[in-house]
Amino acid sequence: MTYIFDGSLQGLLTASFEWFERKPGKVMLKSTEMFQPEAFAESLTVMTDATKADRVWAGLQKKLKKEWLRKFYCSYLSEIPEAYNHLFQFTLYIFQNQLGAENNYGNEHVIALAKYAKSVEREKHRMEAFIRFQKTGDGIFYASIDPDFNVLPLISNHFKNRYADQQWVIYDLKRKYGLHYNLTTVEEITISFTNGINKQNPSSILMDEGEALYATLWKDYFKSANIVARKNTKLHVQHVPKRYWKYLTEKAPV
Amino acid sequence: MSDRIREKLNILADAAKYDVSCSSSGGTRKNDTKGLGNSHTSGICHTYTEDGRCVSLLKILLTNHCIYDCLFCVSRKSNDIKRAAFTVDEVVELTMNFYRRNYIEGLFLSSGIFKNADFTMERLLLVVKKLRLEQNYNGYIHLKTIPGASDELIKEAGLYADRMSINLEMPTEAGLKLLAPEKNHADVIKPLDFVQKQITQFTADKKLIKHVPKFVPAGQSTQMVIGATPESDKDIMYTANAFYKNFSLKRVYYSGYVPISNDSRMPVLGTQPPLLRENRLYQTDWLMRFYGFKVQEILNDANPNLDVDIDPKLSWAIRNMQHFPVDINTADYKMILRIPGIGVMSAKKIVQARKFGKLRIDQLKKIGVAYNRAKHFIVCLDSPYQLKDYQGTQIKAFILAESKSKYLKTDNNQILLF
């Protein structure tokens, strides 16, 4: 039996509600996007229902500590198709067992969630590290990203607290939405870019006068801080995988 | 203007890079004033240089003019290099603008000694005060304590800095005397001790009074240069251990000496820095801080130096086979931590998971245990029955045969048979 949901977190939570209402035995959860009808298998399309989802979430809040609720949410943000099914099975497992069942690292769904959450948290941490703002002509600090997972919701607070006295925009080019901090709140935005504009590195005429100088100084600093006698390219690439180089001012060609 | 600042930055960043402390963790400062910056508990490495070291802070000297002539230091008086000095405003501008672009986690400010210790310390203090009081900057600041500076200045600096550090330079007094006759360990110990006592005082006050200002919230650290003088690993780690104990240091850094001088008392120019040895020392440091090992267990008169070919944890296990094999399903956490191939995270997971049933090999692998290494030291539910009791040396040979050291290209101890 396969349950099909719309890919939303609410849909995912509704699915486990539906399971407990019907108790149909073994069920796989798939998103509409990933579902391909099979000849001999039954399927049920889950209608996302906010009230049911809220009830499941409230139930999870009673069963799980904050740390695990975060792991749950992070796994969802990974957007990995198999993660949805693990989340679904994990929810059933948690409701069917005593308090503390999430500590059973011998359980495949528990360990799967721990792993997804770790990857997502790592990506989140990388964004906190590798995002490079460029100051635009109108004084807004702009950065574009295309992270492996949907981490914008996770990094919002970090940037809001840290850069409280400057306006900033972080834009996810892959998922086509971004965050804008206007000195009081963070809001979700979408930008309709003009055709032909370089979204990663907008041309220098759009930029603040000081931008080029500080970018150069930073590149200089990066070079000076290196000890040539200790060169270790393997370690370097391990810490800064090549797919992130496009973000990094210090890695940009001169 | 921009050319001059570029040149200064190049000189003064280059001179500061041999200080290996890079950490930006342990700070607790919040951006309550709605200014710029805050501390991140675990710190953030914003990039890594091509030698693989993390860049977290803007690490610069205020000046590389210095009245001392320490042989191991690039900024020594007798060295014929370009000298430069930042103005207070230049450092403040650089820090603010780098921070705003998310290049850095904060400022690491050190300095050569010009005129005298107090004069230097005053300049450093000016920078941090300007950042905190005028620029409303709440990011991380790591400040060097200048040996010999007055207590008043050090105490004031501690109110603005997140971490302070002062370098031992050489692991033993004898080593230091050899290369820097003007210096001694007592000059380092005095301010370390002073700051430590202040931290304790402020923490105690905090329990009684609500609003006590922060004082060096991220603690103190120090650094030793490794391989410039002939100390044994035991000398180094015993010194480190004593400093961790006596001054509650957050970190001791070990910096493999990169040859920068052709003085006959030092390794010659062009010698490879002792990267492998540095790595082994850090491993020992971790075993002491996170794995519950006593330094005497790892290094003692019988074993004054760490093994080159295997890590210190494995080496301890092989010398102490009487403790193994350990039963994963019953042993206590402390013993599980001592098994080669099992780290802190895996050990914690094992202790949680076994409450739900005895653990099998495949589960251990999924939990993250390096099973190929650990299998020689453990039993779990479905461990294969073993007739033979292997000797420590045999196990070492097994493990070496199936692993390849990343340092192999610099390590030529192994003679090829064929």
Image (cartoon, coloured by chain):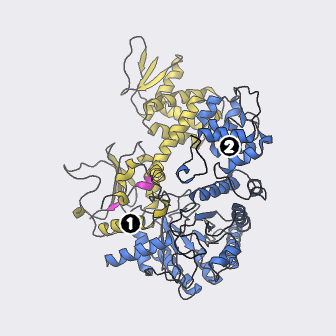
Q: Measured along the vertical axis of the image, is residue A53 above or below residue B158?
A: above
Seen from the viewer's position, the closer of residues A130 and A34 is: A130
Left or right placement of residue B378 versus residue B67 in this view:
right
Q: Which residue is mark 1?
A: A218
Q: Which residue is mark 2?
A: B340
At which x and y percent is residue B230? 67, 68
Chain under numbered label 2? B
Marks counted in the figure total: 2
Mark 2: amino acid: Pro
Q: Residue B241: in sight, yes or no? A: yes
Point out the residue furthest to the top here. Answer: A40
Point out the residue furthest to the right here. Answer: B322
Residue drawn at x 65%, y 46% is B344
Residue drawn at x 72%, y 35% is B378
Point out the residue furthest to the left here. Answer: A195
Q: Which residues are magenta?
A: A127-139
Residue drawn at x 22%, y 52% is A197
Mark 1: amino acid: Trp
Residue drawn at x 33%, y 43% is A174
At which x and y percent is residue B234? 72, 61
At which x and y percent is residue B340? 68, 43
Is residue A129 shown in magenta? yes
How far apart, in angstroms, are the residues tagged by discs 2 and 1? 41 Å
Seen from the viewer's position, the closer of residues B376 and A98 is: B376
Residue B145, quarter of the rendered image: bottom right
Q: Colour of chain B?
A: blue
Helix, strand, or loop for circle 1? helix
Q: Measured along the vertical axis of the image, is residue A13 above or below residue B232?
A: above
Left or right placement of residue B95 versus residue A103 in this view:
left
